[in-house]
Image (cartoon, rainbow, N blue to C red):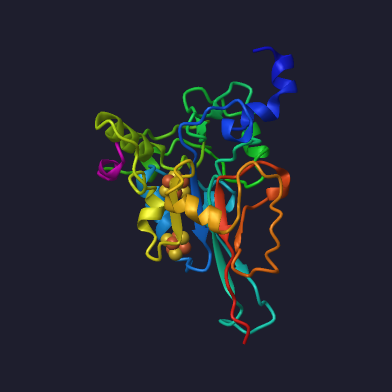
């Protein structure tokens, strides 16, 4: 593939065939996160740490911006004029948005981050040289760099026994981020393949979605029209490959779906449902 070809057809290479592009996706893994159900309990974030062998870096490194949380809970005050606790705290789980046109991918000098046939934005740890260009180019700030080797400090013996053997522990100098729990997706796909059937909705379940006590996070295959996530995207009129949604939510308060930084045209795979506030 020539450089000229890449530059001239860049957006087509990023799009799926269903959107008139060149990419033949097998699945398009996607999420719907209902902010009205999120209580900010952090169970999802904790589950992500346990599932994905994330290092707890400690307070000092956290303050220097060296945290490793693939999923962070952002907190906003909707009504700051009121007295606590009436200030209307709202919470927003923020992880890699697995963008269809991910801005982190083209800037990686060694193609350590690339697009998979599942529509995932993958990270090849062994190829990463730690340039951190991807992190600088991510509008969501959801990429995390290993400034240190955390083997001994994060998991002193015998805590290394609780590490998940389905994925590696990343070493110093390597970038990492939410993978949509790709190891779980792989297990579900392999099982379905062995049984000669498609992956069923709910079979590939991320750790955060599984742990959420209010079921605020729904995960599934957006190419499966009958999946819960597809139905939610459709119900709230949020479409892939659309630069900016044209729905008029003001006319229909039920259309609460939106994607963050939609105007950047990065085509995120995570749809959020706005929180509903009661007018009292
Ligand atoms: S587990 Fe669910 S309710 Fe708790 S912070 Fe995460 S998304 Fe929100
Ligand atoms: S999908 Fe998996 S890797 Fe991503 S935030 Fe949720 S638990 Fe973490």
Quadrant of image for the N terminus? top right
Q: Position of residue 26 (x, y in %)?
A: 46, 31
Q: Would you place residue 46 above or below residue 266 in this image?
A: below
The quarter of the displayed image where residue 84 is located: bottom right
Query: In the image as oriented, which residue stretches furthest toward the top?
Result: 2
Q: Position of residue 56 (x, y in %)?
A: 43, 49
Numbered marks: total: 0
Can I make out residue 107 in this image?
no
Q: Position of residue 176 (x, y in %)?
A: 50, 37
Asked if residue 188 lies left or right of residue 1, the reply is left
Can I make out residue 190 in this image?
yes
Q: Which sits in the foreground, 4 or 40?
A: 4
Magenta segment: does it hold 54?
no
Asked if residue 160 lies left or right of residue 149, the reply is left
Magenta segment: does it hold 162?
yes
Q: Which sits in the foreground, 140 or 274?
A: 274
Q: Would you place residue 243 above or below residue 23 in this image?
A: below
- Identify which residue is drawn at 57% across, 27% down: 23
Range of magenta residues: 158-166
Ligand 1's quadrant? bottom left
Query: In the image as oriented, which residue stretches furthest toward the bottom?
Result: 280
- Identify which residue is drawn at 74% across, 15% down: 4
Q: Which sits in the foreground, 261 or 145?
A: 261
The quarter of the displayed image where residue 100 is located: top right
- Identify which residue is drawn at 58% across, 59% down: 236
Q: Which sits in the foreground, 115 or 25?
A: 25
Q: Position of residue 30 (x, y in %)?
A: 50, 46
Quadrant of image for the C terminus? bottom right
């Amino acid at each position: 593939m020539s450089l000229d070809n890449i530059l001239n057809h860049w957006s087509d290479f990023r799009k799926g065939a269903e959107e008139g592009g060149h990419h033949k996706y097998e699945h398009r893994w996607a999420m719907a996160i209902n902010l009205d159900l999120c209580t900010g309990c952090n169970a999802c974030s904790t589950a992500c740490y346990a599932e994905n062998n994330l290092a707890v870096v400690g307070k000092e490194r956290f303050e220097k911006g060296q945290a490793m949380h693939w999923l962070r809970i952002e907190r906003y005050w909707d009504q700051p004029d009121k007295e606590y606790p009436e200030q209307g705290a709202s919470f927003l789980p923020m992880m890699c948005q697995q963008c269809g046109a991910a801005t982190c991918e083209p800037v990686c000098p060694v193609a350590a981050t690339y697009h998979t046939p599942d529509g995932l934005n993958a990270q090849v740890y062994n190829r990463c040289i730690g340039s951190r260009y991807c992190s600088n180019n991510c509008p969501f700030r959801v990429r995390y760099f290993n400034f240190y080797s955390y083997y001994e400090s994060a998991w002193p013996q015998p805590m290394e026994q609780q590490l998940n053997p389905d994925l590696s522990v990343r070493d110093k100098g390597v970038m990492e981020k939410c993978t949509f729990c790709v190891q779980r997706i792989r297990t579900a796909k392999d099982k379905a393949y062995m049984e000669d059937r498609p992956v069923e909705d709910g079979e590939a379940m991320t750790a955060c979605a599984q742990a959420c006590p209010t079921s605020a996070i729904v995960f599934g295959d957006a190419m499966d029209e009958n999946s819960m996530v597809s139905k939610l995207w459709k119900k709230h009129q949020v479409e892939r490959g659309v630069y900016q949604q044209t729905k008029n939510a003001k006319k229909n308060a039920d259309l609460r779906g939106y994607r963050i930084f939609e105007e950047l045209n990065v085509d995120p795979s995570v749809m959020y449902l706005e929180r509903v506030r009661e007018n009292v």
